[in-house]
Each structure stands twice: as structure tokens, then as C-alpha cells.
Image (cartoon, grey):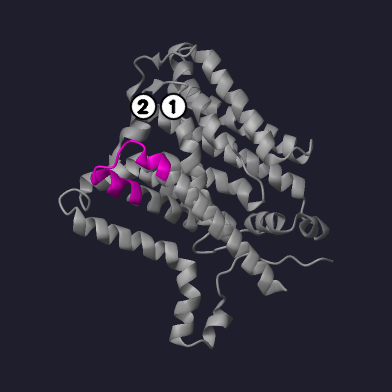
Amino acid sequence: MQSIESNALEPTEDELAGASIGEKIIRLVPVYGLVILTVLLIVLFSILLPSTFPTMLNLRAILSDKAIIALLSLAAIIPMAAGRIDLTVGYGIVLWHVLAISLQLYLGLPWPLAVLIVLVLGAFVGFLNGLLVEVAKIDAFIATLGTGTILYALALWHTGGRQVVGVLPQGFYAISGTFVFGLPITAFYVFAITIILWIVFDHLPIGRYLYAIGANPRAGALNGIPTRKFVVGAFIASGTLTALTGVLLASRLRIGQASVGLEYLLPALVGAFLGSTTIKPGRVNVWGTIVGVAILAVGISGIQQFGGSFWVEPMFNGSTLLIAIGIAGYAQRKRGAVRK
């Protein structure tokens, strides 16, 4: 029976046990380098912008603005753990936020039922993605790009290029507009889902199976892991979480517009790829993803407060994505060299 090895680069307790302090630092800095950089950026911007950056107002703005990206990044890492990519996290949110509003305005559905329908449809699209990848054997990038483009086209057809506007129930607005302990409730959604995914990935067999599939699908199958079932399940979970994020976006914007949503795809993927370079470098992980989103949020917020132009955010996101992919590729090659 073929063995399954982890593709993470973090040192084990046994490796650190006999190491000196200097050796431990050398081993741990690459693992927690992004965390350290995030803290340093927070300190730097707090010193340079003492009246605007280290304030509760700025914290609320960051948490509110980046909660959508954080949730999409978490959705993206579920199939990524199994070695697949899901581009519908960016395209799907366009249709889901429009649908969450139009089901209430045009069909008169109560908002809980409208939300439930969107979640079910999101899970169904994830199921279709899983079938395309695992049964039809279409490359995940191509399959989800095709599915996502269809979803985007449906959103354009449904709206006719116009905004979906109307008065919605206060309960629907409250699911994203409520503040708890002075912070937006969306931040608590992110925290709760992060904890759930951390438990799944790090403490339940399903997480180990997904990592095993991502590391070596053939070895996973030879060890009795039902690869197809877990990959399809990963896409269903990703689709459901994307749909939930679309609902939250609709509640926050209070209008539906097909031109809104695609701009979240790049930063969501950046956060996911950055997550594979820290905490557990060499593989996607939940806490690394949150750190990846955090460094994007802190960096962009600080640069914008310095007077950065409108093009700074996409430039920062694109550059960071290239750096993240480069670091992830280096980590994987280093892991391969260690194995040899």
C-alpha cells in the first residue's frame, strides 16, 4: 500500500526539540514570516498615521470591507486542499447576491426562504463543478471558469444590465448590518467559519483525506480514500459558502448589480495562495488564509490613507498574487528536495 506524506514544511516538535534557539528561529521565521510582516505593517502604519490608522473606525472599516474577501478565500481553499481550484467563488457571488434580492422583490418570498434557495443553488453549482472535474475529467480551472462564466451571463440576463433595487425587510439588512461589541457582525461570521474549517482540516479525518488527495491522488485512492466523493463534497462546500457570501454582500449593498462581484475574485485567490506560504507553508491552511487576507487589508488600508490612487489596490493584489505563487512554488520544490 502506497504511503501518504504531508506536503507541509512546518518543523515538527521532534525537529525542534534538539535545536538551539538560533536554529529554531531559522526554522520558524519562514513559517511565521507573513504573520511577523503583518504585525510590523500594523506597527509601521500606526506610527506613521497615528490619527487615522490605529482607530476603531479604521478597524471597523477593514473588518467590514474584507469580510467578503475572507469568506471567499476560505471557500476557495476547500477544493484547493484537494488539489483543485474553484473560480466560481468570484463569478458565483455576482449571481447569488442579485438572486438573494430579486427573489424577495419579484416573487415576494420571505427573506429566510430566499436565503435558503440561494444556498441550495450554490450547493448545486458546486455539485455540478465536482461532476465536471471528477466524472467528466475536465481540468478544474477550465471547468469552473466555464461554470462561472455561465453564472455571470445568467446574472447579466436576469438584470438586463440594470440595478435590482427595492425596499427589503429589516431582518435581511440586519444579517450584515448589525454590530456586536462595536464590531460588524460579518467579522464574527468569518471567525465562526474559520474555526469550523480549522476543526475540519486539522482535527477530523475529512481534512486529512483532502490533504492526502491534494498531495497524491493516486496514493489516496490506493489507501482506500474515496477520492471522487471527497472532491465533489469539497466543491459543494465551496459553492455553499460562496452563496452565503453572496447573501451577505446583498444584505450589505442593498441592491443587486451584475457589475459587482468579479472584483472579489483576485483578492480572494491572493488570500488563498498567501495562506499556503505561512503557518503551514507548502499547503493551503485556514489560519494562513486569514493572515493572507489580513496582510492585504492592512497593506491596502495603509497605502490608501497615504493617498494612494484608485489603481493601487488591483496593483497590490496582482503583485502579491505573483509573489505568493512564487513562494508557494519554491516551498513545494524545497519539500521535494527534502524528500529526495
User: Alpha-carbon neighbours of circle 2 within 10 Å: few (<14), some, or many (≥20)?
Assistant: some
For the point 70% across and 67% down, the residue is 5
Which disc is residue 260 wearing?
1
Task: Determine the secondary structure under disc 2.
Answer: helix
Vertical side of 340 occupied by 138: above or below: above
Task: Determine the secondary structure under disc 1.
Answer: loop
Q: Within the magenta stretch, is there residue 307? A: yes
For the point 55% across and 14% down, the residue is 157
Q: Residue furthest left?
A: 51
Q: Quadrant of residue 238?
A: top right
Residue 120 horizontal side relative to residue 68, left or right: right
Residue 83 horizontal side relative to residue 2, left or right: left
Q: Which amino acid is tagged 1?
A: Val
Q: Which amino acid is tagged 2?
A: Leu
Residue 237 in picture, x, y percent from top left:
60, 41
Vertical side of 174 occupied by 84: above or below: below
